[in-house]
Image (tube, rainbow, N blue to C red):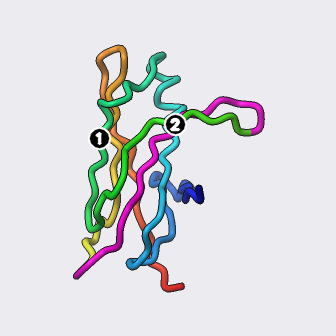
Amino acid sequence: MDVKVPVKDGSKWKVDRDRDEISYYAADITNELRDRNTIAVQGKVVALAYGVEVLEGPEIQVATIDGAERTFVVVKLGDSAGELPDDWRWVARVSCANGERFDKTTWFNEVDP
């Protein structure tokens, strides 16, 4: 599966995206979970989309990258119709086993392939 992983730009996580694209996107929530000393609750994670449709997910996935275990929220997003909002993005709203909840937002940079 080809997953688009965002990069940090200042205080925002951003990823390049074509408005006609249908792709998987991943939000790395490892640090947020570590800071809270908890785990995400599968089935209680919500994907909120602004200017794009959620086609699949969200789903919690754990992967080992460079020897370290990382936790991701993965969604499949559809294309965008009409005018794009200024805050074109998707949000992973994560409920934790300790009762806390947090949002991880990924903003899109529009690109034309």
Query: Where does the N terminus fall, quadrant-wise?
Result: bottom right
Q: How far apart are marks 1 and 2 (CA)?
A: 14 Å
Snapshot quadrant of residue 45 = top left
Numbered badge on residue 46: 1
Residue 80 percent coordinates (x, y): 31, 74
Q: Which residue is painted at 47% across and 31% down in the image?
A: 32
- Say few, some or many: other residues with alpha carbon within 10 Å of mark 2 (under 14 / 14 to 19 / 20 or more): few
Residue beneath disc 2: 61
Residue 63 percent coordinates (x, y): 63, 36
The amino acid at mark 2 is Gln
Q: Which residue is painted at 46% across and 72% down in the image?
A: 17
Residue 28 percent coordinates (x, y): 52, 42
Q: Which residue is painted at 52% across and 36% down in the image?
A: 61
Q: Which residue is painted at 51% across and 56% down in the image?
A: 10
- Helix, strand or loop under label 2: strand
Snapshot quadrant of residue 84 = bottom left
**Camera-side residue of 36 and 2:** 2
In this rendering, the answer to whether 12 lies above or below 92 is: below
Numbered badge on residue 8: none
The amino acid at mark 1 is Val
In this rendering, the answer to whether 99 lies above or below 87 is: above
Q: Are marks 1 and 2 in contact (CB under 8 Å)?
A: no
Q: Does the magenta stretch include residue 74?
A: yes
Query: Where does the C terminus fall, quadrant-wise?
Result: bottom right
Snapshot quadrant of residue 39 = top left
Part of the protein shown in magenta: 66-83
Q: Does the magenta stretch include residue 11?
A: no
Relative horizontal placement of residue 56, taking residue 32 as reference (left or right) = left
The earlier-in-sequence mark between 1 and 2 is 1
